[in-house]
Amino acid sequence: MNNLRFSVNFLVAAIIATVVLTGCRKDKQPTSYNPGKASTKTGLAYNGKDENSFAVRDYKGIPDAPDMRYIEGGRLILGSFEEDLLQTHDNVERTVTVASFFMDETEVANIHWLEYLHYAQDSGQQYYEEALPDTTVWARELAFNDPYVDNYLRYPGFRFFPVVGVSWIQANNYCKWRTSMVNRVLALQNGTDEEVEAAENGEQIPLESGVVLPNFRLPTEAEWEYAAQALVGVQELDENHSHRRIYPWDGHSTRNPYGREMGNFMANFKRGRGDYAGIGGNLNDASMVTCWIYENPPNDFGLYNMAGNVNEWVEDVYRPLTFQDFDDLNPVRKNGYLDDTDWDYVYDKPNYTTFIDNHVRVYKGGSWKDVAYWLAPGTRRYLEEDSATATIGFRCAMINPGRNY
């Protein structure tokens, strides 16, 4: 009995000692937030009195990015959960993994683009003119949409409606400008005297400082679809989802099945031929054209209008076989890589055998002018990167640096 008691006590003591020692070792291991006072490989001191010593700044984590939501990555099945009505076979289901990232809570709105235009004037007349949206996208020969041509972008009532008439190229230029402006603000707020001076002079602040953010950019198609599905809301134990979603919300209907909003549509889209919003006195889906960027309920990631309102540009060039070709970790289609040279005639755009080349980009999400079929996150369409319409806008994304969760 005494031997048994001794064995038990010894075992308990050994476990406690192991936990304590393990904890101590872990506490002493360097991290991004606590790198220590010297290099673990060379022994050279960080931030020494010698001006040539390696400087390692304090780091408390990535600065807050305005309007961005954290999207925890994971596994998803890309591809449409809807029937392939057009028989394009370009969204065959495939399992991939997307790393965690950040995405704008809302679409970029008119007021944000007007802000961009205001500062674009400092970069010269040519840059300013290239940044101007094509407001004539509203014009139609057989429709009286002319007031939108003059008013939609600039009238204050439309400030927080999504900007349209913007090409993929213009959207990318906005992302670059936003990066420089946000990082300038962060450097002025949190930078050293040298970094503040550099920011005031319009110079780039090094990423090593930890003061600034990585680049804003367009999301990849996989990121966008992952964020739209928002299957975190149907997560169960053991990495299982209780069900898949046709739309960014639960159910097979485009109407809200719950509470006081029961029966209301969950997105701004075209209900049927000639029916954009419902009957006067009880307009149901928010608007005849676009609507307020916060109009409809957010999905489980907190993102608004991931279906309807406007389609959204993504990074990828379009290929029908994209889902079969690309990598299964952080997939993206950047160019014509893997296009079979023996089948070049299939993508022979100059001779009118196709509309596809390396300058057509994917857009997703459905718009105020689209029927419900296009609201499904897996559906995909494409357009030339220098083209614009009244139905396509965008939102920005950003990597989540230094973390795997």
Image (cartoon, rainbow, N blue to C red):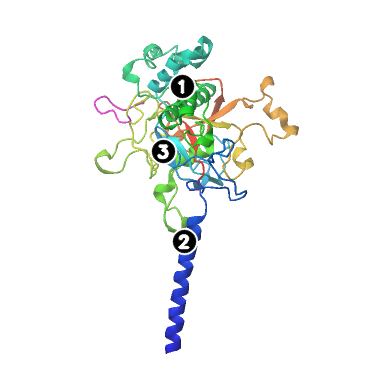
Q: Can you give x and y, in whole percent of width and height, for residue 116 in the image?
A: 44, 19
Residue reaching furthest bottom?
Answer: 1
Tell me if 69 is positioned left or right of 218 in this view.
Answer: left
Closer to the camera in the image, 380 or 71: 71
Image vertical order of residue 50 relative to residue 145, above or below: below
Identified by mark 3, the residue type is Arg
Between the C-alphas of marks 2 and 3, the distance is 33 Å
**Label 2 sits on residue:** 23
Quadrant of the drawing holding the N terminus: bottom left
Indicate whether residue 34 is drawn in magenta.
Answer: no
Is residue 194 visible to the viewer in this orientation of the structure?
yes
Residue 25: mark: none
Residue 200: mark: 1
**Magenta-tinted stretch:** 276-285
Identified by mark 2, the residue type is Gly
Residue 69: mark: 3
Closer to the camera in the image, 219 or 258: 219
Residues tagged 3 and 1 counted as in contact (Cβ below 8 A): no
